[in-house]
Amino acid sequence: MTSTPDSQPSGTVRRDSVFIVAGIVWMVIYWVALLFLKNPNTPGPVKMAAVLVPAIPFGFFLFRFISYVRSLDELHRRVHLEALALAFPIATLFLMTLGLIERAGMLSKYWSYQDVWYYLPLFYLIAVAVSWRRYR
């Protein structure tokens, strides 16, 4: 099998798939932990495990993500760096505003940190899209 300039080496495809699988495993374990935590009959030690266990696959996911970014060429790394440089201030603005809304007593009692973190990866993905537009 010959390699064309546009094709990716098989090692890159494998790194990408491990990174994606690690993310999926982390999310599944996170959702299972949420089910245990939402059940009022879950014993205390199981609740503590449900709190701590998702950190293990997330740590592996983070390690794989960093390896993935390091394996990219200079342009791709620059896009991800610019995305982080955009997403971080957006996340800071978001959290600061939520904190002030909470301080003003206008935040719903049903809103919590559990609801906030979902936005952070979303900000990053939007920032990656914005950053890619610059280089197209």
Image (spheres, rainbow, N blue to C red):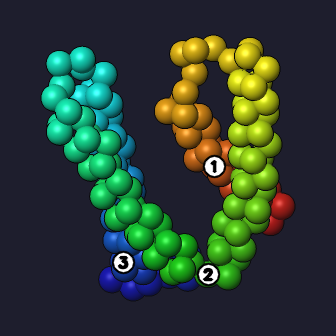
What residue does disc 2 label? Answer: 73
Q: Which residue is mark 1?
A: 125
Q: At label 3, which amino acid type do we have?
A: Ser
Of the residues tagged 3 and 2, which is closer to the observer?
A: 2
Residue 119 is left or right of residue 131, and the answer is: left
Q: Quadrant of residue 81?
A: bottom right
Q: Earlier in the sequence, mark 3 or mark 2?
A: 3
Residue drawn at x 71%, y 46% as measured from the top left: 91
Q: Position of residue 75 (x, y in %)?
A: 70, 76
* Residue 17 in view: no
The residue at 42%/80% (across/down) is: 9
Q: Amino acid at mark 1?
A: Leu
Q: Label 3, on which residue?
A: 10
Q: Which mark is residue 114?
A: none
Disc number lying in front (1 or 2): 1
Three-letter amino acid code of the residue under disc 2: Asp
Residue 22: x percent and y percent?
33, 57
Name the quarter where the N terminus is drawn.
bottom left
First in residue order: circle 1 vs circle 2: 2
> Residue 20 or 88: which is nearer the viewer?
88
User: Around disc 3, counting alpha carbons within 10 Å, would you say few (fewer than 14), some (14 to 19), or many (20 or more)?
Assistant: few
Q: Tell me where residue 49 appears, x and y as whole percent.
A: 22, 44
Disc 1 element: helix
Label 1 Cα crowd, 10 Å radius (few <14 / some 14-19 / many 20+):
some
